[in-house]
């Protein structure tokens, strides 16, 4: 652990910026690893029932943290450009997870309407659905991806 007493305030601020940058890079590395683990279903090799189970029991994350990571990974798989947006800092893991949850909810509505033989409903992500995550994105270009 670093002894912060030896640093000036400006040095401490610089070190904190570096730590934040490193954390963001590490998040993308982890999500990329989890994406491959999920793609291969490698978690089953070590007797985990799902990616979520692996992230909770194998990696030691809390269930809420695991759900966020798994949702972000699934969005990265469904919309490959998301990875670039996370890498560039235009989208956070949390925002990606929220978008994925909205997409899943919309897909459920589409399936329900199909079951009722309604053809008037057109699937797609509306801007109003994503309003909750819009403030998390620096650019609106994410809306053109999904």
Image: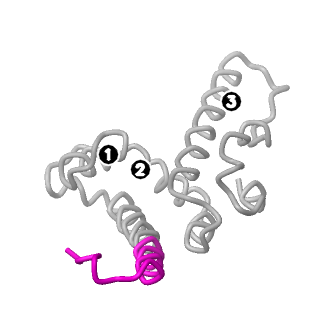
Work out how far the residue at label 3 is from the one at label 2, CA to CA, in angstroms. Answer: 22 Å
Where, by quadrant of the figure, is residue 34 drawn?
bottom left
Q: Is residue 38 above or below residue 118?
A: below
In the figure, 122 relative to 140: above or below? above
- Residue nearer the viewer, 75 or 98: 98
Q: Are marks 2 and 1 in contact (CB under 8 Å)?
A: yes
Q: Residue at x 37, y 40 (%)?
A: 64
Which quadrant of the rendered structure holds the N terminus?
Answer: bottom left
Q: Position of residue 63 (x, y in %)?
A: 31, 39
Which residue is denoted by mark 2 in the rendering?
Answer: 70
**Badge 1 is on which residue?**
52
Q: Which residues are magenta?
A: 1-22
Q: Classify mark 2: helix, strand or loop.
A: helix
Position of residue 128 in the picture relative to residue 83 (left or right): right
> Does the magenta segment cover residue 9?
yes
Counting residues from the start of the chain, the first of labels 3 and 2 encountered is: 2
Image point (43%, 84%), residue name: 11
Within-10-Å neighbours for mark 1: few <14, some 14–19, many 20+: many
**In the depicted structure, whether residue 65 falls above or below residue 37:** above
Q: Which residue is mark 3?
A: 110
Query: Which label sits in the foreground, 3 or 2?
Result: 2
Element marked by disc 3: helix
- Could you tell which of marks 2 and 1 lies nearer the N-terminus? 1
Which secondary structure dominates the residues rendered in magenta? helix
């Amino acid at each position: 652990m670093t002894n912060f007493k030896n640093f000036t305030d400006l040095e401490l601020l610089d070190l904190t910026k570096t730590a934040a940058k490193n954390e963001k890079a590490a998040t993308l590395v982890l999500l990329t690893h989890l994406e491959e683990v999920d793609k291969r279903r490698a978690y089953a090799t070590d007797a985990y029932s799902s990616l979520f189970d692996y992230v909770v029991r194998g990696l030691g994350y809390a269930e809420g943290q695991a759900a966020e990571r798994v949702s972000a990974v699934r969005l990265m798989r469904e919309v490959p450009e998301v990875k670039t947006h996370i890498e560039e800092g235009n989208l956070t893991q949390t925002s990606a997870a929220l978008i994925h949850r909205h997409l899943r909810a919309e897909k459920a509505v589409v399936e329900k309407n199909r079951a009722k033989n309604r053809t008037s409903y057109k699937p797609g992500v509306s801007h109003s659905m994503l309003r909750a995550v819009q403030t998390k994105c620096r650019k609106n270009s994410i809306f053109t991806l999904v």
